[in-house]
Amino acid sequence: MTLETVDPLAVRRNEIAEMAADLFCVSVEEVVSAESFADDVDADSLLVIELLSRLEKRYGITITDADVVRLVNLSATCELVAECAGR
């Protein structure tokens, strides 16, 4: 019997992708492939603020006003959450 190792960063990335897809009313694949939430999935600033709120709630973190501009795509968002959560 082998034990599968679960990568917590991959789990978090999937959770964030699903959260963003639900909020932006697009598929997870669209979120994953988007280079820019604003340009590729039409996420306006209010949706990004709502994503920030959900991320803070879900992961028990605080994202500063200065860091909101970093929520531009899935990779950048995951990186910011990891930094705020101490990895």
Image (cartoon, helix red, strand yellow):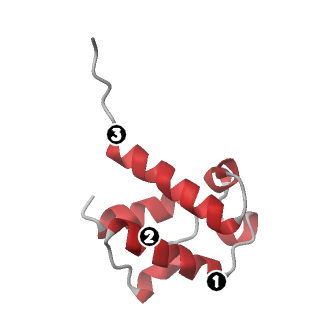
The residue depicted at 70 percent of the width and 52 percent of the height is 27
Label of residue 45 in the image: 1
Return the residue nearer the eye: 26 or 70: 26
Picture quadrant of residue 34 = bottom right
Q: Amino acid at mark 1?
A: Ser
x then y, percent, for residue 83: 31, 66
Helix, strand or loop at label 1? It is helix
Cα distance in 3D space between marks 1 and 3: 31 Å
Report the quarter where the C terminus lies.
bottom left
Helix, strand or loop at label 2? It is helix
Cα distance in 3D space between marks 2 and 3: 19 Å
x then y, percent, for residue 51: 54, 73
Residue 43 in the figure: left or right of residue 81: right
* Residue with the mark numbered 3: 7
Residue 48 in the figure: left or right of residue 68: right
Q: Amino acid at mark 3?
A: Asp
User: Are circles 1 and 3 on residues that touch, CB within 8 Å?
Assistant: no
Label of residue 55 in the image: 2
Helix, strand or loop at label 3? It is loop
The residue depicted at 49 percent of the width and 63 percent of the height is 76
